[in-house]
Image (cartoon, rainbow, N blue to C red):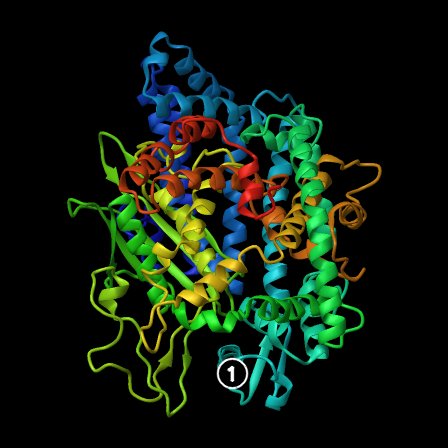
Amino acid sequence: MNPDNPLLAESGLPRFSAIRPEQVEPAIDAVLADYRAGIDAVLASTAPRDFAGVIGCSESLEDRLNRTWAPVSHLHGVADSEALRKAYAAAQEKIVEFSSELGQNRDLFAAVNAVAQRPDSTTLPAAARALLAHELRDFRLAGVALEEPARTRFREISSALAKLATEFEEAVLDATDAWSESIHDEAALAGIPESGRAVLRAYAQDQGEDGWRVTLKQPSVQAVLTFADDRALRERVYTAYQTRASDQGPHAGQFDNSARMEQLLALRHEAAQLLGFHDAAEESLATKMAPAPATVLDFLHDLAARAKPVAQREFAELREYARTQLGIAELAAWDVGYAAEKLREHKYALREEELKPYFALDAVLEGLFAITGRIFGVSLKPRSDVDVWHADVRYYDLVGADGTVFAGAYFDLYARAGKRGGAWMDVCINRFVDAAHRQLPVAFLTCNFAPPTKGSADEVRTPPSLACVAGEGGTIGSADGGVRAGAATPSLLTHDDVLTLFHEFGHGLHHLLTEVDLPGVGGINGVEWDAVELPSQFMENFGWQREALDLFARHWQSGERLPDDLFARMQAARHFHAGLFLVRQLEFALFDFRIHREYEPTRGARVMEILAEVRAEVAVIQPPTWQRFPHAFTHIFAGGYAAGYYSYLWAEVLSADAFGRFEEEGVFNATTGACWRKEILAVGASRPALESFIAFRGRAPTPDALLRSYGLAT
């Protein structure tokens, strides 16, 4: 291997600043060649087929590929460029082709099966037994039993699906970056608070412009649709955002994902049928908790029946308020967020802008880390010697109670051009411990919050100190009690942003606190997809607890903690429009499951037709017919949630019920926290998720916990 190629380093953290697009293909070529040679050596060996000789070697080879590919895949999402896209696509095609070839290698399947058939296989550790079972299942799902021409066709489909998913995601990114509107008259921004205007001003400055620039980045869209008094501006932003990458809107046809959706659904259906499943929805459940499609549909329909009447009452109230108080005779889709914010303020005397000063990003991180320390007995220490892909990226070591570093995490939290929207956690390095080495887990945590902005000349700021960020104690503020004029205003989060950060960190803890030594079933790897959201949604609960908020919710200028009356109003508004939110999630979940369940080659995907049917059943707010949210639905068309978006709600049942134990025994009860770490986070996929839940909760989950968490229980 070429030692000068940073992607081929076999230890340490990735050297992001040294990675170049032209290095990607040579690195992947080299690693895949070694992978093939390693598998050939395993199969050529005359030694008895045992776990270490077959599964252990395969895990090591797979981990080597993951170490090389993870930084490339991550850069493709957070630092996009045309050159990197081309290199990524070429390398991805080779990886998919190799993975398909490996999954259909009958000699390797026979070797793994021989290990499973050994008399001593039942005495293997739980993680090893689980990995064996997963390996055999995955061989079958890769088409190992297929005969020609089905074998070749399945490989062709796998390659095409990977390419289409990448193209889908890139089209959404391009469409997001393509639209903007420059504003030079501040009167057009009436209603948008100063924090929102500062974001729009920063977008203009990034382009060398005066004034303000409205974009389709989330902080901009949120500011306009929630606060802008200019209804025409709200309509333009809504139209551009909700028609991204489609046949409608200001860039109609330019980045259109319509054909890609049709092709993705057709190929997924064909692949599922080649494997003997009725459809792609049924195939997806092979790696999930839900036993059958009917179970999923019954679950969703039952929730819809309970939630829709509540949502209808909420929307009727909103519509009447908009008519009588805001002068909006007919509430349009671009009015909903604006009117809802006004109604929430009217009912609860609560404005999002009133909360944001108490949620400066650095203070929120400080609190998140303090919560982690109290519950799980670990701390996070910042490091400044780590090579990163952007100046805003932070890196932290996770340190145990004995002072030992056992994991690490990158945090990339601000929205910017060339970065995929949304929030996610991904694996940089897996925990892997064997006789040869001990590899510690490292995670990527990515969000798209509004970045800090420059303050005006007469402002004095007091951001959190680095010691506080590190969770090392100290006080909020710099040594002189403030920062000189013109310093940056910190990134101020909405409460929803706080919950998003806690959510992604929950995923991160699942990966970082694993005690499973085998990557294939450690951390988030191998966990049933409808349970993988359990640790993330669980962490969101702390964002509502007074004890937790007291650790970080302090006014970024005065240091004053979140006032009791403001906390009470926030709690009173917690379930504001819970019904509307839930039916929206049900719309996403049912749409996703049905388009995969009901695909018919003779009729095509019927994407918009099925969406209309789902909306007729569950939706209360009917968007314009030209709205095209599916065209930017990357979760299911470019992510891992195909026929699995219901997982968010399924796992929310588990998380709501699980957090009930903390509510019963104490939010910061270290014994309860230790049990959560031991029974949920540490075990990964070494046993079924339901067994892990029961081990923690002492019983099976109660579905009503979800409705209680939304305030909808009767």
Relative to 428, residue 385 above or below:
below
- Relative side of 34 to 592, left or right: left
Q: Is residue 192 shown to the viewer in this render?
A: yes
Q: Nearer the viewer, residue 262 or 201?
A: 201
Q: Residue at x 80, y 50 (%)?
A: 612
Query: Which sits in the foreground, 114 or 360?
Result: 360
Among the 4 quarters of the image, the one containing residue 41 = top left
User: If the image is split into quadrants, where does the C terminus sit?
Assistant: top right
Looking at the rendered structure, the number of numbered marks drawn on it comes to 1
Instruction: Choose top left, top right, bottom left or bottom right for residue 491.
Output: bottom left
The residue pinned by badge 1 equals 201
- How many residues crowd around disc 1 within 10 Å: few (fewer than 14), some, or many (20 or more)? many
Q: Is residue 587 above or below residue 281?
A: below
Q: Residue furthest left?
A: 402
The percent coordinates of residue 43 (x first, y second) are 40, 21
Residue at (67, 69) in percent of width and height: 339
Q: Against 705, is 711 above or below?
A: below
Q: Where is residue 7 in the image (x, y as percent from the top left)?
A: 36, 51
Secondary structure of residue under mark 1? helix
Residue found at the very far right of the displayed protein: 602
**Residue name at image x 64 percent, y 68 percent:** 343
Q: Which image quarter is the N terminus in?
A: top left
Residue at the top extreme of this rendering: 119
Look at label 1 and name its amino acid: Arg
- The spot of residue 332 in percent (x, y) is 76, 67
Task: Answer yes or no: is residue 14 visible.
Answer: no
Image location (x, y in percent) of residue 604:
80, 42
- Say which residue appears at 62% left-offset and 22% top-offset: 146
Which of these two is toward me, 52 or 517?
Answer: 517
